[in-house]
Amino acid sequence: MHHHHHFEPFEELLEVLLGGLAEAGREFVVHFLLDTMNIFLLLIAVMMAVSFLQTYVPFEKLQKKLMGLKSFWGYLLALFMGTLSPFCSCTIIPVLIGLLRLGVPTGVCVCFLTSASLLNLGALVSLFTAVGGSFFWVYLGCALVMTLAGSMLFARLCPAQGLLVESDPHHCCGREGHHHHHHHEETPKNLRERLRGAWENTSDMLCRAWVYILVGVGLSSAAVAFIPMEAMSGYFAADHPGTLVLAVLFGAVIHSDVYSVLPVIRLVAPLSLPVSMGFTLGVMAISVPEAVLLLRVFRGRYVALYSGILTAFSLAFGLLLMVVF
């Protein structure tokens, strides 16, 4: 469906080497290998650059500043912090607990949490590079509204007391929970430390996501090779609300992030903006593992409320795009 302009000599070599395979099988292998190279090279370049820049962000100062801002400016600073945050959804939980214990309002803390998921700088740059302008700008608008409105709605619907669970802020993911912290505790002193921290962040992300990336590449390659594109285009372009609901729910349930689902988004985005947008928002906003981690912070019914608000927003934006487009 999409041509790999950067790998044309390699693509031609593969076509020759795989000449004995049936056409569909050959197309699957070519797409799988080239998309895998494409995605991994893209992610390594983007994550190294973004992680390096994040070493210059004074997060401790921003957290102290956040304590003094209770109004709309607090929400804006929290959104900014979440966007620049180098934390994954695992290490964000201790940070969230710390902010709540410092007396930062619940809505502002949730805004930080949501923007770290939906608007993380590494994810935004990867999305823009992989999918292109129009999809990215629509996503950015939806994610900004979702982060601010969702956080405020959550704060409005939650009580002042009885919201939090007492927990150990340093125990978030069992045995693997501790290994993300070491390169955020001290400010890098020189270029070598900054580059090492950037590489640790990048390799961290790849270690957690590589299986999901390969599964995503496999699914999109199989779709391109074995499903007639006319049939797939017709199915998605029909913009049926049922397709959107399934895409949003599937996105919200799977443990993933934009890095893992880039191959699927690249495949579906040209076929249907509403369905692919609902799916992407669902993937980025919440997942079952993240909801389980949040049970260490909020009581069960409020985790369900938070997950429900984000899923409802993902669905609402998909339906709105169906009407508009």
Image: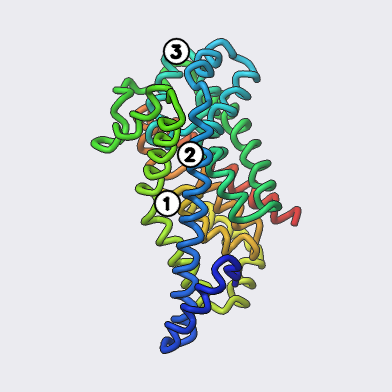
Question: Does the image show residue 54?
Answer: yes
For label 1, the residue is: 254
Q: Which residue is drawn at 46% across and 81% down?
A: 26
Q: Which residue matches tag 2?
A: 307
Q: Which of marks 2 and 1 is nearer the N terminus?
A: 1
Q: Nearer the viewer, mark 3 or mark 2?
A: 3
- Tell me the residue at 59%/48% (across/down): 315
Nearer the N terminus, badge 1 or badge 3? 3
Mark 1 crowd level (few <14, some 14–19, many ≥20, 10 Å Cα) = some
How far apart are the two marked residues, 2 and 1, measured between alpha carbons?
Answer: 13 Å
Point 31% across, 23% down: residue: 167
Q: Identify the residue position indicated by label 3 in the image.
A: 102
The tag on residue 290 is none
Q: Quadrant of the N terminus?
A: bottom right
User: Is 285 in front, or is 134?
Assistant: 134
Indicate the amino acid at tag 1. Ile
> Does residue 288 appear in this view?
no
Q: Is residue 267 above or below residue 111?
A: below
Q: Is mark 3 on a helix, strand or loop?
A: loop
| Image quadrant where residue 171 sits | top left
The residue nearer to you, when weighing 205 against 68, is 205
Foreground: disc 2 or disc 1: 1
The secondary element bearing badge 1 is classed as loop
**Left or right: where 119 falls relative to 195:** right
- The disc labelled 2 sits on which kind of residue? Ser
Q: Tell me: 69 left or right of 113.
A: right
As measured in the structure, the alpha-carbon distance from the residue carrying label 3 to the one carrying label 2 is: 24 Å
Residues at marks 1 and 3, CA–CA distance in whole angstroms:
32 Å
Q: Is residue 301 left or right of residue 65?
A: left
